[in-house]
Image (tube, coloured by chain):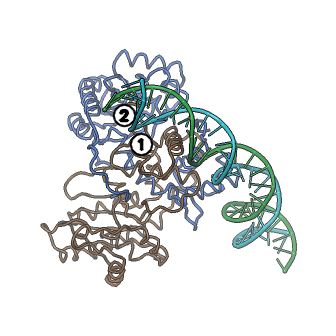
Chain colours: A blue, B brown, C green, D cyan
Amino acid sequence: MVAGGHADGTVGKALEVLDLVASHGRPLRFSDLLVRSDFPKATLYRLLQTLTHQGMLDHDPETGNYAAGLRLVRLAHAAWAHSSLAPIARPFLDDLAARTGETIHLAQLDQGQVLYVDKRNAAQPVEMFAQAGKVGPAYCTGVGKAMLAWLAPEALETALARQSFHRHTAQTLDNRETLLAELAAIRARGHAWDREEHEPGIICCAVPILSGSGRVLGGLSVTSTTTRTTLEALGALTPMIGEIAAKIAAEAESWRFPDEAAVRDGAGPR
Amino acid sequence: MVAGGHADGTVGKALEVLDLVASHGRPLRFSDLLVRSDFPKATLYRLLQTLTHQGMLDHDPETGNYAAGLRLVRLAHAAWAHSSLAPIARPFLDDLAARTGETIHLAQLDQGQVLYVDKRNAAQPVEMFAQAGKVGPAYCTGVGKAMLAWLAPEALETALARQSFHRHTAQTLDNRETLLAELAAIRARGHAWDREEHEPGIICCAVPILSGSGRVLGGLSVTSTTTRTTLEALGALTPMIGEIAAKIAAEAESWRFPDEAAVRDGAGPR
DNA sequence: TACCACGGTTTCATTATTTGAAACCAAGTC
DNA sequence: GACTTGGTTTCAAATAATGAAACCGTGGTA
């Protein structure tokens, strides 16, 4: 059961359907969706029709499958440029990746989940959308916990409400209480560990990216494996990670969009 | 005036607003949007509120700016994986890039426009969303014309209706008639040129990616500059480009999503 | 061939949501 | 202190969404 918020109006319902389609790895048929949603047949049908007609979904008449539509890719381009730290952080991530030689994650919170907005992979070249745009749980990842730890009380509350705790590994903190204790420890320490809480063998050290006023802008982490390094060794990098996070925060705050710029006539993009 | 289709219902309107925000390079205030849309004040206000509440838009209370929201990035990840050729084409693009040493574009048509879904840059490393997700005009780019040329008559008609011709350079084919003639020539020749029609100094050679039944799946191009090469030299690559396009098409058709796969309990991603 | 079951699509009277003119409020400005 | 400008709220009227049920086309099966 998706921990959804109270759908506001028709738009909310439509977006719920959109999520339903998007959150499955593979395209789905009408009947699949009908089972998974609790909309009545006709309603679901019309919502799908509208979304398809709008290009938010793709409908293959051959197979009858609905898939997330390309219009989303176009919209996301704007979202990524407007609302994410990624465009700003890029050079800093490059720097951090070069200096540590490890995998770097830049993430932001979205609906209580960790949304990775950029990444530097130790060896392989960048993998575009296949990497950025991915979501992960907040309660058992380094960046997730780092961000949660500095959230304001009410924000934390709503975020916690959206967690669906699951014991991924033996180390996973799979309940509210232990997580809260951990968050307090993280605040005290200044950074978060991932002690193989999400995937066995994967460890990381993460810090929040905070605005001048203390608001959580995002999270930054350096990830490695237990075969390659240890928590202690990763911990030694903390000052460097923190320094980069601070630089990103500073840049984010000073950043203003290239001002006004003669407003083209309303002719859509370009 | 956005060449939009007749908005279906509230959802259509909401998405129109979303586009409005997304299609501008920088975040906009309520009043900016009010001027640009022809929704009445109260209606626009409520749509913005809904979209914001849903995470499709971001509203900065400080500045009052609306920007495309992060939820879109998450959705786009699915769209990219579901509906684009990119995940399939990746190795082929790598190959083509390595063999030609030039810039490679993989594009698909979205609402009559060229949507770039992947790219290989001659020298620089990949630039993620900053590149993929970009849109460009169809009538004056290589990939655009290559795709238009093989479109079925009605599809072509709707696509043409969405073009807003503009003379980017002296070579731009900026009207329906010359474009139609060019498309016929392209069909006859088997590939499309961009003779500095979009940007001065930029030339390219593009082919369509066609399904077995002749449906246009996308477009593939090799781009260079007049200072570095000539149309003739680019043309010599045509067989290679065509071969790669065919491989991508074949792969796309044989591709089936990792079947059924035990449906996890509805616990969202991962 | 007839019968049924399975997706998927359409109808239509009922219901709930959206609509938007206008009023309102909060900050600036002159 | 009157007057913008920019944003938010109200409320009756207009409109769009709803969903049970009927319908259709296809494929399987007796």
**Would you place residue A12 above or below residue B155 in this image?**
above
Q: Quadrant of the C terminus of chain A?
A: bottom left
Tell me if C13 is positioned left or right of B140 in this view: right
Tell me if A45 is positioned left or right of A206 in this view: right
The residue drawn where x is 37% and y is 50% is A77
For the residue pair C23 and B97, the one nearer the viewer reads as C23
Residue A15 shows in this picture: yes
Which kind of residue does numbered mark 1 sit on? Ser
Name the residue beneath numbered marker 2. Answer: B63
Indicate the position of residue B19 as horizontal and vertical percent values. Answer: 44, 52
The residue drawn where x is 37% and y is 15% is A188
Q: Secondary structure at mark 2?
A: loop
Q: Secondary structure at mark 1?
A: helix
Residue A32 shows in this picture: no
Indicate the position of residue A166 as horizontal and vertical percent values. Answer: 54, 31
Chain letter for mark 1, please. B
Which kind of residue does numbered mark 2 sit on? Thr
Q: Which mark is residue B31?
A: 1
Q: Quadrant of the N terminus of chain A?
A: top right
Viewer-nearest of labels 1 and 2? Answer: 1
Tell me if A137 is positioned left or right of B227 in this view: right
